[in-house]
Amino acid sequence: MFPHRNECGPKVFHTPAQCAQRTQLPRNILVPTSKIIEGWIYFSSSIYYVSTEKKNWTESRDDCRERGSDLLIINSREEQNFINMWRKYQEVWIGLGDSETEGVWKWVDGSELITGFWRAGEPNSNGDEDCVINEWNWADYPCNSQFNWICEKRIMTI
């Protein structure tokens, strides 16, 4: 009934065109599971890695980039709650800072902060505090401080 079924895997496609389109998808699309890569965990449309060592913000970001990711960008209360549950009580660098313009908080992808989860009294720019840690809620800190960090890699699902 569906002669193209074996060519496209277990999913049944209704037309040969749908089958052809399926076989032309990139091979690097990830399908979410509870653990995608050793040491990483899946949530929503990203995978996350929490470091086991401490570095300054720049070194932390460099480590994420070496892993093909970047420092964490928090897009929702659900993601903030997930990170808090998973970071094991560690204070961690996230991908937010105001080093370009004081008080203008930007994510590592260049987008401006819209919704924040700041701790009471934060951000306070006490001294030269241009980078952000997550410790249940956010606090600005000097970028040369040493903390664990979280990398995030956005993934596509099918």
Image (cartoon, rainbow, N blue to C red):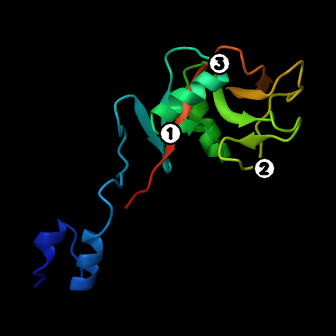
User: Mark 1 near mark 3, Cβ–Cβ under 8 Å?
Assistant: no
Residue at position x 46%, y 39% from top?
Answer: 68
Q: Tag 2: residue type?
A: Ile
**Image vertical order of residue 69 relative to residue 23, above or below:** above
Look at the image and tell me whether residue 141 can be seen. yes
Judge from the rendering whether residue 11 lies leftward or rightward of residue 25; answer left or right.
left
**Image vertical order of residue 8 relative to residue 98, above or below:** below
Q: Which mark is residue 114?
A: 2
Judge from the rendering whether residue 67 lies leftward or rightward of residue 129; answer left or right.
left
* Separation of residues labelled 2 and 3 (CA atoms): 25 Å
Mark nearest the camera among 2 and 1 is 1
**Image vertical order of residue 27 relative to residue 17, above or below:** above
Q: Secondary structure at mark 2?
A: loop
Disc 1 marks which residue?
A: 69
Judge from the rendering whether residue 41 lies leftward or rightward of residue 78; answer left or right.
left
Disc 3 marks which residue?
A: 56
**Badge 1 density bin: few <14, some 14–19, many ≥20, Cα 10 Å:** some
Q: Tag 1: residue type?
A: Ser
Residue at position x 79%, y 26% from top?
Answer: 140
Percent position of residue 77, x then y: 67, 44
* Separation of residues labelled 2 and 1 (CA atoms): 22 Å
